Image: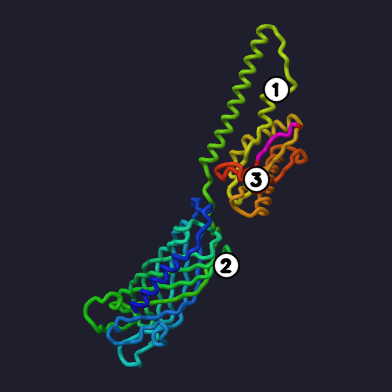
């Protein structure tokens, strides 16, 4: 039996080394979801094998496939992921098992109806080590926990410790296929036979043990993904740059006012251009509205403050407005990015209509994926400007 456990351990290490690598661009922090997000339910069928306290020295076959020690079983669990890498679940398994004794063949394979309930901590090493990827096909998830078991046949209770490996294979956003291997180490003779064949503690042989292999399904409830945290610092830096540009324009306007005041004081009539350069430069300066990755809804309503100014100017002067949408070329295919950029432009156009700009005065264009700005998140934007020609 010890050899079997060693083989399972080496299998786990091999599986971890083969875990899929996530796209480096997807290694990012995620926003905390609400309490009602990222819940799941699991159901499965098991093949379980019991190794009893009384077996030591009886030279019984150790294979978990022997019919005198194994039986099918069932399992159900409910749990929640608190982060992409850390979760909790409550699992109940059992119904059918077989007690294995040291005596005659007549004692082998006695039926033992039971259940074991465990509270377990799940560690999604694929997300922890390779970065969160909502489209990863295979997630490698070791777990550990503790709980209590009961033999309904022999009316025995026992506490237990539990460890195992859960492999999840993504079928869709809501459903995954499970392959799970686990070990329940129980504190006393839950199989109903309290006779002892040896003295002292011999590790796992001094307790009843339950090994199982399970095949089942995971059903994700509600929101099952995680959103990237907005790049607040980058947005603040870009906003500050726009503020600095407006301040420079304001300084130029103040300088022009001072010049005109001096001309008035000297009773000279200044030549007034058809359109003041400072005003024209301000109107022609594009205003940016930003979006989160793969989204067409505006990341922050604060971006619409400058858009309101453009909308008012366009209405007051009966001018057109142009909206250009962009996506970042680092993620997504060209066709997807083109459609996403067009959706972003149309989203901003709808906001302009809400602000009173006639739709026939607005032109939109999607430019697809670009790599014009750094960091990459700056490219996920739409620009708005008044058409003066």
Question: Where does the image place residue 101, in percent across and percent down from the top left?
Answer: 32, 86
**Observer able to see residue 259:** yes
* Range of magenta residues: 383-388
Which badge, 1 or 3, comes first in the chain's sequence?
1
Q: Earlier in the sequence, mark 3 or mark 2?
A: 2
Callout 3 secondary element: strand
* Between discs 1 and 2, the one toward the N terminus: 2
Our reading of the magenta stretch's main secondary structure is: strand
- Which disc is residue 276 wearing? 1
SS of the residue under disc 2 = loop
Q: Residue at x 39, y 83 (%)?
A: 63
Q: Nearer the viewer, residue 85 or 24?
A: 24
* Spatial separation of the CA atoms under disc 1 and disc 2: 62 Å
Q: Which mark is residue 326?
A: 3
Which disc is residue 171 wearing?
2
Question: Residues under labels 3 and 2: Cα distance?
Answer: 32 Å
| Residue contact between numbered discs 3 and 2, judged by CB atoms under 8 Å | no
């Amino acid at each position: 039996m010890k050899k079997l456990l060693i083989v399972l351990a080496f299998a786990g290490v091999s599986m971890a080394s083969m875990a899929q690598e996530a796209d480096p661009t997807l290694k990012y922090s995620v926003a905390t979801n609400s309490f009602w997000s990222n819940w799941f339910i699991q159901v499965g069928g098991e093949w379980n094998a019991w190794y009893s306290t009384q077996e030591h020295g009886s030279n019984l076959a150790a294979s978990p496939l022997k019919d005198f020690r194994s039986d099918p079983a069932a399992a159900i669990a409910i749990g929640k992921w608190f982060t992409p890498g850390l979760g909790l679940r409550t699992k109940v398994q059992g119904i059918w098992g077989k007690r294995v004794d040291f005596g005659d063949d007549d004692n082998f394979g006695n039926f033992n109806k039971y259940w074991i309930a465990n509270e377990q901590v799940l560690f999604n090493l694929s997300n922890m080590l390779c970065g969160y990827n909502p489209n990863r096909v295979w997630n490698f998830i070791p777990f550990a926990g503790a709980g209590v078991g009961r033999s309904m046949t022999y009316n025995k209770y026992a506490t237990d410790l539990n460890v195992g490996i859960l492999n999840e294979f993504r079928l869709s956003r809501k459903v995954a296929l499970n392959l799970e291997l686990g070990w329940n180490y129980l504190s006393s003779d839950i199989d109903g036979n309290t006779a002892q064949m040896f003295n002292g503690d011999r590790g796992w042989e001094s307790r009843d043990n339950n090994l199982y292999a399970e095949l089942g399904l995971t059903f994700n409830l509600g929101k099952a993904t995680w959103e990237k945290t907005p790049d607040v610092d980058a947005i603040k830096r870009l906003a500050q740059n726009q503020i600095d540009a407006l301040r420079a324009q304001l300084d130029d306007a103040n300088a022009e006012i001072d010049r005109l005041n001096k001309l008035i004081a000297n009773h000279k009539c200044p030549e007034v251009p058809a359109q003041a350069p400072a005003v024209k430069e301000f109107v022609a300066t594009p205003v940016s509205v930003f979006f989160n990755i793969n989204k067409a809804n505006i990341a922050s309503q604060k971006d619409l403050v400058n858009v309101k100014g453009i909308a008012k100017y366009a209405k007051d002067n009966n001018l057109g407005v142009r909206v250009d949408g962009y996506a970042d070329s680092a993620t997504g295919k060209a066709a997807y990015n083109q459609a996403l950029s067009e959706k972003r432009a149309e989203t901003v156009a709808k906001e302009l209509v809400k602000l009173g700009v006639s739709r026939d005065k607005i032109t939109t264009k999607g430019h697809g994926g670009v790599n014009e700005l750094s960091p990459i998140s700056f490219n996920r934007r739409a620009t708005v400007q008044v058409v003066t020609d």
